[in-house]
């Protein structure tokens, strides 16, 4: 029962985002981006409430992952195959480039090697999930893992909003925009959120 309040708040934010996304000028942002913005606004106005934390943590850990799994179940391997080898080549190149650049810049600014490695992996692979998987392997402390996860999550959120706002000015087709989002945003949730600005085809490609 202690989780009900937090889950109720997250559900309320989700429903609010669903209806707000139907308003003129806000449709371009997509429901998922609006949900993130409403959640940030809620936190800024009402602060951190201890009573809500268990439900919010449950929603972010399990309900979000369940949603991503359901999103994946909508896809079919044939669709992934038909996306073409060039999409996978773009993804591999982006991963290698992002990992090398972030690690190199981190070391250039004399950031601790462990933190540099975690941040580079989180940026290049899949955000906080990659950091959580790699941290025990390199014997990272919780502080470094938390800092790197916060950094990549914050930047992912910022660029999710930027991509959504820029979509109509980029001139990409929905499929090209989806490939762009999927290749350059690390979190699956962020890629799907940004892709939603381009519609169903963009989300599936992302």
Image (cartoon, helix red, strand yellow):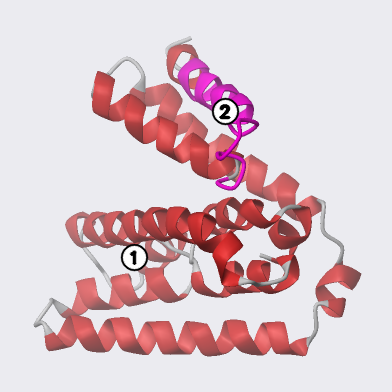
- Residue drawn at x 43%, y 89% as measured from the top left: 97
Is any part of residue 48 visible from this angle? Answer: no
In the rendered view, tell whether residue 125 sits above or below residue 204.
below
Location of the C terminus by quadrant is bottom right
Tell me the SS state at disc 2: helix
Label 1 crowd bin: few (<14), some (14–19), many (20+), radius 10 Å: few
As drawn, the label of residue 136 is 1
- Residue drawn at x 44%, y 76% as measured from the top left: 124
Residue range highlighted in magenta: 8-29
Q: Which residue is mark 2?
A: 20
Where residue 68 appears, as percent x and y from the top left, is 65, 48
Quarter of the image for residue 90 reads bottom right
- Residue drawn at x 48%, y 73% as measured from the top left: 125
Where residue 36 appears, as percent x and y from the top left, is 45, 39
Along the line of sight, the residue nearer the viewer: 118 or 85: 85
Left or right: where 155 falls relative to 141:
right
Along the line of sight, the residue nearer the viewer: 204 or 76: 204
């Amino acid at each position: 029962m202690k989780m009900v309040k937090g889950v109720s708040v997250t559900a309320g934010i989700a429903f609010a985002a669903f209806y707000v996304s139907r308003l003129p000028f806000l449709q371009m942002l997509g429901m998922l981006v609006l949900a993130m913005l409403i959640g940030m606004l809620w936190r800024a106005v009402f602060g951190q409430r201890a009573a809500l934390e268990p439900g919010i943590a449950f929603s972010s850990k399990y309900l979000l992952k369940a949603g991503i799994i359901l999103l994946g179940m909508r896809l079919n391997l044939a669709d992934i195959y038909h996306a073409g080898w060039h999409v996978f080549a773009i993804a591999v190149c982006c991963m290698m480039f992002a990992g090398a650049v972030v690690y190199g810049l981190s070391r250039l600014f004399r950031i601790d090697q462990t933190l540099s490695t975690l941040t580079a992996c989180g940026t290049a692979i899949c955000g906080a999930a990659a950091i959580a998987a790699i941290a025990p392997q390199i014997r990272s402390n919780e502080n470094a893992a938390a800092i790197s996860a916060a950094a990549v999550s914050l930047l992912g959120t910022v660029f999710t909003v930027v991509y959504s706002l820029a979509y109509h000015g980029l001139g990409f087709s929905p499929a090209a925009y989806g490939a762009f989002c999927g290749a350059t945003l690390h979190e699956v949730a962020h890629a799907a959120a940004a892709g939603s600005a381009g519609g169903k085809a963009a989300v599936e490609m992302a």
